[in-house]
Amino acid sequence: MGKAVINGIPVEFEPGMTILEVARKVQVRIPTLCKHPDLPPSAGCGICVVKVKGSNKMLRACCTPMEENMQIITHDPDIVQARRTVVELILSNHPNDCLTCGRNQNCELQTMIADFAIREEEFKKIVPNLPVDNTTGTVVLEPPKCIKCGRCVEVCQNMQDVWALSFLDRGVDTRISPAGDIKLGDSPCVRCGQCSAHCPTGAIFENDDTTLVWKALQDSEKYCVVQIAPAVRVAVGEGFGYEPGTNLTGKLYSLLRRLGFKAVFDTNFAADLTIMEEASEFVERFVNKKGPLPLITTCCPAWVDFMEKFDSDMIEHFSSAKSPQEMLSALAKTYYAQKIGVDPQKIFMVSIMPCTAKKYEIHRSKEMFTAGNQNTDVSITTRELIRMIRQAGVDFAELPDEGADSLLGDYTGAGVIFGATGGVMEAALRTAYYFVTKENLPKVEFEAVRGLKGVKETTVTIKGTDIRIAVAHGLGNVQSVINKVRAAKEKGEPLPYHFIEVMACPGGCVGGGGQPYGVTDEVRRARAKGVYADDESKTLRCSHENPYVQKLYQDFLGKPLGEKSHHLLHTKYQPQPEYRK
């Protein structure tokens, strides 16, 4: 441990720590706009300047390593004035439309301007006249609001390995854009939304579909139903002062009825159903040798889009099971409609997801249409739901807990852990073990697939047979796993894995691109902890034990991988070879 002094306070530090990181150890907050805990420093904004005793220079704290015996000053009149000037310069290149911005009251630049009490603009305005790009239908790009911090470019290129965004031009004309200055909808973008989750301003944000939901709720001809994803329940509370990871499932059920939905379902139920189909698919391939291994999960629409673009040679390995969102929506317009005697054409399904890519998934192929119309009519993010709650004037914290509509709402512990990286794999293994042995696992937790390590590899033994598995989250971690499979196939060697789970977003759905802003690994862990606590609280923790899923097969579907299941619950994939790297 090294020793130094910050603002007269002695501090110890590990080699390689930056001044910014060390300052936090002694409760000193150095302001910055470009640095995010997920990302390496870019030193792009220059707001984090500090002084070192014995030097006239100001150093950028985000990228300067702390050295032995350094004496750092983080706040004095000169430093405050320098930071204020930098913020004023950024403001001179930024539009003044906060009131109509998607990040109003939740913008890091807006907060910084308030902190520095900037009331007048000292520099001439030079705001670029650049068009809005909403061609993806999921995330909206507004280049005039970009402060050139580089977060989105770092996320897209290096964390996600998509390379849809880059910097174009130089100097004052620098701007974010897809390479080649094409539209975002024509770029390799996979709609994961991690750019919007990391953007400090309103330069990138989710396409807001809340007006479509309000309009449907006011339409007497529509029978509005809703579903909520596993990760939403442990994050939505952050918009109302709750700690990350607080499970508000019961309040959400109550809220959605207050908003006017006639039935409240839970995507966790469909997660149990997904496992019934996906675990059956794995057993068919692994035990009965019907299909190639490894089996690769397909619950994540951003990953599916990525696969079709960059790894389309792996399509034969992909599970054909639809995502839980699409399974539940298909059943709402068939099974549920029959049960209650409502015309399927009148059912309007709204899904609340932690994900921006779900907005794309609902119309990505003809398999997403059932009973003559789209399965999921509108998909909104956790952030959009928070806005709807505020618009409705509901005192969310004081709502009583209620239950879901059980027909498509009751779930096991396995269903809720879909929200965290490794959860799909863990849930599938619990049921695959039962399908093979006709016995439940004595211990259902698979600790080796949990946590935030980018790629998790382990071997699970079922009745003397080893199953090699891998779990990858964050698209930048996926290629190493896929390349191992590809190399083994080309060389005719034994496969490195039999089963692979992929989630596009770091941490899985708890870190989804549509979750509340301010995500860090600490927040991801807290949200995941809430998901696993929900699992542990359940009497039934394996998907095949869900009595409503069992009844669904008895009354309607027949059996997993059966003819009706295949028609309603499975899909196909389309290669997009023009994107191959």
Image (spheres, rainbow, N blue to C red):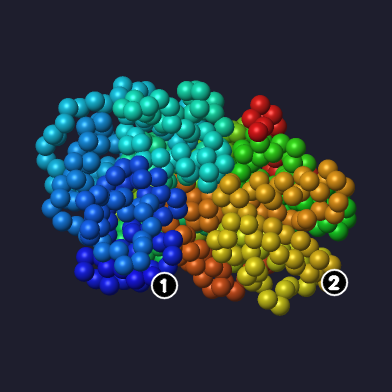
Residue 368, how many percent across, how many down? 62, 37
User: What residue sits 66% from the left and 36% below the top?
Assistant: 310
Q: Is residue 86 left or right of residue 577?
A: left
Q: Nearer the viewer, residue 194 or 433?
A: 194
Q: Is residue 278 left or right of residue 524?
A: right
Tell me how far mark 2 sits from mark 1, CA to CA: 47 Å
Q: Is residue 453 left or right of residue 248?
A: right
Quadrant of the image containing the C terminus: top right
Q: Secondary structure at mark 1?
A: loop
Q: Is residue 79 left or right of residue 247?
A: left
User: What residue sits 61% from the left and 44% below the top?
Assistant: 303
Q: Is residue 82 above or below residue 1?
A: above
User: Residue under circle 1?
Assistant: 1
Residue 490, how many percent across, how many down? 83, 43
Give the quarter of the image for residue 465: bottom right
Amino acid tagged 1: Met
Residue 376 disc label:
none
- Residue 446 shows in the view: yes
Q: Is residue 224 above or below residue 452?
A: above
Within 10 angstroms of label 2, few (less than 14), some, or many (20 or more) residues? few
Considering only order in the chain, which callout, 1 or 2, is on the residue closer to the N terminus?
1
Quadrant of the image containing the N terminus: bottom left
User: What residue sits 42% from the left and 46% below the top?
Assistant: 197
- Residue 132 shows in the view: no
